[in-house]
Amino acid sequence: MTVPSLIGLGFSLMNVPFGVSSTLSIGLVCGGNVTILWGWVIVSVLNLFIALSLAEITSKYPTSGGVYHFSAILAPEKYSLVSSWFTGWYLILGNLTFFISDVFGGALFVLSIFGLNNANYRRNDIFVLLVYYLFVIICAIVNIKFQNLLEKINKACTYWVIYTVLIMDFLLLIFPSNFHDIKYVLTHFDASRSGWPGPVAFFIGLQAASFTLQGFGMIPSMCDEVKTPEKTVPKGMVYSVLVTSFTGIIFIIPVLSILPELSRLLDDNPEIFPIDIVFKLSTKSMVVSFLLVIMLCGTLFFAGVSTLTTASRCFYSFARDNGLPFSHFFSHVDETESNEVVPKNTVILSCIISMLLGLLSLIASSA
């Protein structure tokens, strides 16, 4: 992999269009425009500092273990092993839940499209789970059978996301007849729906930007598959955060400039993602709305494939260091027909655990 493909990997992990779209309701409830826009700017700056710190450490210790190797090296010798073990398991849980949240959120989003023309739409939990399983299987097939295409897929993601944002901005700005003024876009703040005092609601609302601007910490897990990782990985990590931060701003501002009343977004049908309603009300066309949704679905594909890639590499690296039960089995790699080396066992393990955890959705809606 090269710097452009790692930027694409980070870009697909953070997935601006879907990340912002799927968490829009959080920002709307917790303050509205100020929380969504300026919260994005604040979280972008803070995550850039984190990326720079990780990049500096990675340039010195470029290993696929990433942060759990870093913690072993940087901690005092007395606490090295325990720090590495806990960090490794947290890294695995973080990678795995990131993959699950992306793909499960994608299943919810795709099915909510059918509610745009149906005021009585209610999602079926079993059907959501089946669509989620289908997405997991597709991501697994791409990672196992088309390993040689991952670099091209990551590069394609960069172009797809950027053009998705630009096309969405263009369509959202030419169809609506009513726009909010720039003062409203930049300064409107209303946290009355949150039940919290304004400052508290603002900080809670930062989770919307935080959900999107994460994942770049997984990039060091790809060190074994990168030439000169001490230079390539740090550059890919920092550049991906910079590009994602800028892309988020040019996506958020047009959306905020055409937002309809909150009652129409949050109350009329809470089963439908607010961004779907924004598309429908602003374009006044089901065809154009469906086109915009399809473009978002494309970003979901890239995010699902990339998050499974990094999760499986994290499992593999931890197994190679004897951090997992049955480490010998999970550190095994298979050679494909195209001479690509794939940790197939950890890809399958990631998918099985993801499917099992998906069953929680049948027990509790909050899960």
Image (cartoon, rainbow, N blue to C red):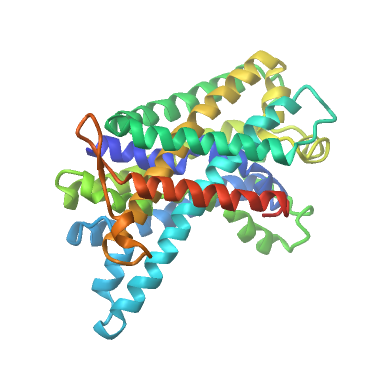
Image quadrant of residue 227?
Answer: top left
Residue 217 location (% of width, % of height): 37, 54
- Return the x and y of residue 206 as percentages of the image width and height: 58, 55
Q: Could you tell me which residue is drawn at 27 percent across and 67 percent down? A: 70
Q: Left or right of 307: which side holds 63? A: left
Name the outermost residue toward the bottom: 78
Percent from the top left, x then y, of residue 100?
53, 47
Q: Is residue 65 above or below residue 131?
A: below
Q: Depth check: give the residue in front, 31 or 230.
A: 230
Viewer can see residue 28? yes
Q: Answer with the quarter of the image where residue 255 lies.
A: top right
Q: Which one is in front, 179 or 12?
A: 12
Image position of 143 (left or right of 102): left
Q: Residue at x 19, y 33 (%)?
A: 339
Residue 276 position, x and y percent, is 68, 29
Q: Which quadrant of the view contains residue 74?
A: bottom left
Q: Is residue 273 among what the camera can see?
A: no
For the point 64% across and 34% down, which residue is it?
109
The residue lying at 53 percent from left, 43 percent from top is 102
The quadrant of the image that shows the N terminus is top left
> On the rendered image, what quadrant is the C terminus found in?
bottom right
> Is residue 155 depicted above or below 327 in this figure?
above
Q: How many marks?
A: 0
Q: Is residue 22 left or right of residue 219?
A: right
In the shown orientation, is residue 16 left or right of residue 27?
left
Pick whichever, 340 or 90, lies toward us: 340
